Image (cartoon, grey):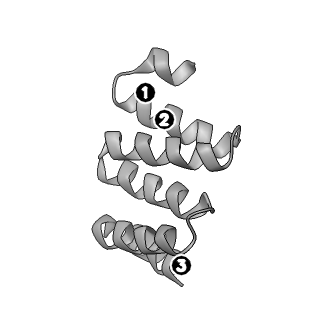
């Protein structure tokens, strides 16, 4: 329920409420990378690049090699001016 509501908030541009719902979802299922993936995307949409990178990195610890997570982290790093790290 929290992920779905967070996605709706993200689509509506309310990234603050989206982050709250994704955080609740992550607390309820700490072994799942999905809430972290979505929270990272909300942070990225809000322009909070360091939080986005942190969440993508945490999600990758749960799902190593996931191409969507790698792309998301790379995008956040590149937007933050860290192009070399984005390519690594």
Quadrant the N terminus occupies: bottom right
Q: Which residue is drawn at 60% across and 43% down?
A: 60
Mark 3 to mark 1 CA distance (whole Å): 28 Å
- Work out whether mark 3 precedes mark 1 in sequence or the reverse, and give the earlier one: 3
Estimate the x, y position of residue 48 in percent, counting from the top left. Answer: 29, 46
* Label 2: element kind: helix
Q: Answer yes or no: is residue 41 visible.
A: yes
Within 10 Å of the Cα at label 1, are there few (<14), some (14-19), or many (20+) other Cα atoms? some
Q: Answer yes or no: is residue 13 visible.
A: no
Q: Which residue is drawn at 71% across and 37% down?
A: 65
Estimate the x, y position of residue 41 in percent, counting from the top left. Answer: 46, 54
Mark 1 to mark 2 CA distance (whole Å): 5 Å
Quadrant the C terminus occupies: top right
Q: Which residue is drawn at 70% across and 43% down?
A: 66
Estimate the x, y position of residue 9 in percent, counting from the top left. Answer: 39, 74
Circle on res. 75: 2
Estimate the x, y position of residue 59 in percent, counting from the top left. Answer: 56, 49
Q: Which of 7 and 63 is in front in this view?
A: 63
Circle on res. 78: 1
44 above or below 35? above
Q: Nearer the viewer, residue 85 or 24?
A: 24
- Work out whether mark 2 precedes mark 3 in sequence or the reverse, and give the earlier one: 3
Say left or right for 64 vs 57: right
Question: CB of mark 1 within 8 Å of CB of mark 2?
Answer: yes
Residue ranking furthest to the top: 84
Circle on res. 4: 3
Question: CB of mark 3 within 8 Å of CB of mark 1?
Answer: no
Q: Quadrant of residue 79?
A: top left
Q: Residue at x 36, y 66 (%)?
A: 19
């Amino acid at each position: 329920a929290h992920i779905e509501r967070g996605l709706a908030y993200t689509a509506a541009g309310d990234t603050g409420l989206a982050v709250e719902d994704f955080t609740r979802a992550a607390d309820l299922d700490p072994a799942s990378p999905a809430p972290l993936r979505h929270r990272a995307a909300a942070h990225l949409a809000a322009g909070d690049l360091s939080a986005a990178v942190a969440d993508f990195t945490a999600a990758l610890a749960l799902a190593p090699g996931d191409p969507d997570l790698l792309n998301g982290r790379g995008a956040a790093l590149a937007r933050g001016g860290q192009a070399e790290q984005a390519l690594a």
